[in-house]
Amino acid sequence: MLTALSALAVALVTAIGGVVTAVIGRRQPRGQQRRDDFTTIVKELRQNQDDLKAELAAQKEQSARDRERITAQDFTIRYMVGWVRTLVGFIRDSHLEPPPPPQPVPTEAEPFLHDVGL
């Protein structure tokens, strides 16, 4: 009887060991999961990097267009200021007084009119 009980105990331990081995064998190693996560993250980061590069290029293009527009507006304003000064000088040379500028001058325009005399 002792032999039968010891054989039963050995069979039980062997069965438990087999179940544990099967469960451990079916599990995916943590290292593999980390590698899969890393490759997924790297792909997403590369895609985000490409998206950011495209967005930066679009912003640079918009900035260049804005600079061109501001330069053209600056040239136009300088031309108009010169033309107004010429007209005022012509009127004063004719011994007349030019009309006063319309009042009130907008507060947004005051910083830019310091050299016109308004």
Image: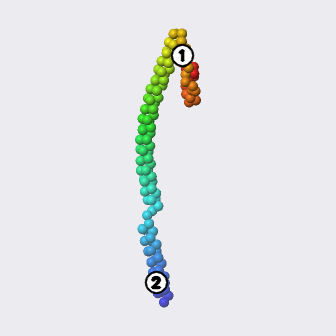
**Left or right relative to 114: residue 1:** left
Which label's residue is closer to the chain start, 1 or 2? 2
Label 2's element?
Answer: helix
The count of marks equals 2
The image quadrant where one finds the C terminus is top right
Q: Is residue 83 above or below residue 60?
A: above
In terms of image quadrants, where is residue 108?
A: top right
Q: Name the residue: 44% across, 43% down.
A: 52
| Classed neighbour count for the residue bearing mark 1: other residues with Cα under 10 Å, few (<14), some (14–19), many (≥20) | few
Q: Which quarter of the figure has residue 33? A: bottom left
At a point 44% along the width and 59% down the height, the residue shown is 32
In the image, which is nearer the foreground, mark 1 or mark 2?
1
Q: Residue at x 46, y 83 (%)?
A: 7
Front position in the image: 90 or 85: 90
Specify the label residue 7 is tagged with: 2
- Amino acid type at circle 2 is Ala
Dot 1 amino acid type: Pro
Measured Cα–Cα span from mark 1 to mark 2 = 123 Å
Judging depth in this view, the residue of 82 and 101 nearest the camera is 101
Closer to the camera, 34 or 117?
Answer: 117
User: On residue 98, which mark appears?
Assistant: 1
Is residue 111 visible to us here?
A: no
Tell me residue 69's x, y (percent): 44, 29
